[in-house]
Amino acid sequence: MEAALTNILAILQARVSSTRLPGKVLKPIMGRPMLALQVERVLQATKIDQLIIATSTDPSDDELESLCEGIHVPCYRGSLNDVLDRFYQAAQTWKPKHVVRITGDCPLIDPVVIDAVIAYYLNGDYDYVSNTVEPTFPDGLDIEIFRFSILEEAWKEASLPSQREHVTPFIHQHPDRYRIGNYRNTEDLSHMRWTVDEAEDFDLINRIYNELYPFDPNFRMADILNLLQQKTEWLSINKQFDRNEGFMKSLQEDKRYEAMKRLNLEKSIALQEHAKTRIPGLSQLLSKRPDQFSYGVWPGYFSRAKGVEIWDLDDNHYVDMSIGGIGANVLGYADPDVDRAVREALDKGTSASLNCPEEVELADLLCELHPWAEKVRFARTGGESMAIAVRIARAFTGRDKVAFCGYHGWHDWYLSANIGTENALGEHLLSGLDPAGVPKALKGTSFPFRYNQLKELEAILESNKNEIAAIVMEPLRNEWPTPDFINGVRALATATGAILIIDEVSAAFRMNTGGAHLVLGMDPDMAVFSKSLGNGYPMAAIIGKSAVMDAAQKSFISSTYWTERIGPVAAIAMIKKHRQNDVGKHLMKIGQMVQDGWRTLFARHGIPIHIDGTPPMGHFSFEHEKALVAKALFIQGMLEKGFLATTGFYAMFAHQEEHVKAYLDAVDQVLPMLNEAISSGHPESYLIGQPAASGFKRLN
């Protein structure tokens, strides 16, 4: 038939790559592809001028195109995912006045019903008619007919995922624009399921064909109903599935699409996707990887930051009530006093063949803050500084082994604790740290003990007499130390000749100007600082007693960029401002306000959480089996409110009470959504992005 003469064009859309039942349209029934049997039934309709198959250009549909050639039905190939575009382009080829839409999951389609729906449409002068607007026919006898002109309008204007995937939602969602009709059956049979989306569906259809087709290839709906009255047990084969599950999933995608439009993260997400192809793990720091929050909604990159404010690549503005640069920006982002000192240093030159004098000034200042310390070495990052400290302790004692508590970075001495074990580091902040690449010869050189568990340390020392070079621990993180633990660790270090190293990388300058060990009454031999020390500029320091620190000269510990000027200058400016403004007191106050707010609000909304950590560096966890989904939902909701927020909070000097109040107001508004999601039993359906990741794992 000439395309120009086509009045009513039927388009049967089908593809092989079905997500729920791949290859279903080609599955054999009585030795013939299911789609071929469906085409045979459609061609019996008398009111259709032309039938074509619309499939995709995906290679998986090559076989389907070959089938069309074999049964002499025209085949159009278009977009796999934008089905509306595929459908429109297929129709446009034939230039019809009216279009009938049939889907390839309806192998029992009844030509009598097709003709009845078409007649109802034509006689009523409708723009669109279906027997599914208010379904009364069995699921699987679905027919739609509409004017080509409104298909073209939908093609131009539809934007939601459901509208592009399911072709006609845009039309029947606009009853104000279009005259819409619903063709009803004389009896409501909508509870019956004759479609094919699942293996059980196919089982039922296969049985029906094998029972009826050999005796009457032209069997109709009435024949199927008579059969099912005799075979009532067949009705239970697929009764567990809901009608229009695929469309319901698309509506969830609509919500995600609309939310993503509101979040406006196009550039941010695009760069993350590109970064995954260039940077293993996407980020240099695990704690900044977007999957640790919610991949797909966490902005990932910043264009600028000032105080507590951050702008992402799409120029979205956030108040940062999250991780504060993973604790590096204790004063706030782009602190004016620190940045002013750095600019002056830039003008003077940051690196030369001679050393910068500021490193001596900084060494004096750190020893002034920590009167027990006499000498200092510098580096630029926390992990390397901890490795330096352990090296110095080993050089001083002549021993190799280390006992440790807490998290201390990525270097071999630390990760070696996981060699040959399931997850020895699992209770020390990060779980799943794979020691791949760490020499197996280091097995049995590092031994973890838990915080406030003095007997565990005693056991390590007893089992490794005169072999422990250092006892390494954070001053605190999730819980406060008991006096017995503090005094006991010091006594054990002294008795065994082990060097007591306090890792202040995270805790320092949160509660006071200096190390937290000063507040807690700890008496270390060495202490290590980084993160907050430079307020965002790379800087680290290892301080200690003179006799111990001099052992650094026995071992080669040296690096060019440990001599640059910016780090020491930034650290000096940070410390001076910190001390002058009693920043530690402010951080404790702000952090306590946040934690008090968490307790009050989550209790008010009936969502159980557990709060840990010190006020300036606290966090909470959801007491729910889908805690990582809940975390992602909380993040998602807070982003929509204009807050960069997660389940942890690092206080900064730039945080003021008004920031906390606005943040807690937003939390109060987000928690009803979170409660609704949790109460639904399937909170993941509320997610725009992905659930938060836990611990260390590969990012694909």
Image: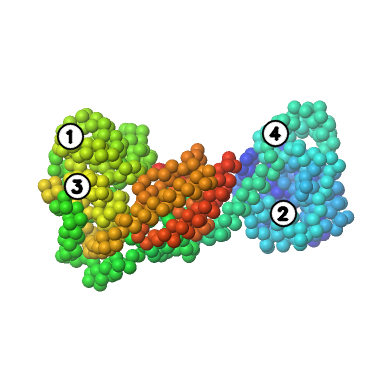
Q: Residue 168, which numbered label?
A: 2
**Mark 4 neighbour density, 10 Å: few (under 14) some (14–19) many (20 or more):** many
Give the label on residue 238, or none: 4
Tag shown at residue 501: none
Residue type, label 4 = Asn
Q: Do residues under tags 3 and 1 come within 8 Å of each other at their CB atoms?
A: no
The residue labelled by disc 1 is 467
The answer for how far apart the CA atoms under marks 2 and 1 are is 75 Å
C-beta proximity under 8 Å, tags 3 and 2: no
Dot 3 corresponds to which residue? Answer: 526
Distance CA(mark 3)–CA(mark 4):
69 Å
On the picture, is 11 further left or further right than 389? right
Is residue 383 visible in the rendered structure shown here? yes
Comparing 110 with 57, the one in front is 110
Residue 416: x and y, percent?
28, 38
Callout 3 secondary element? strand
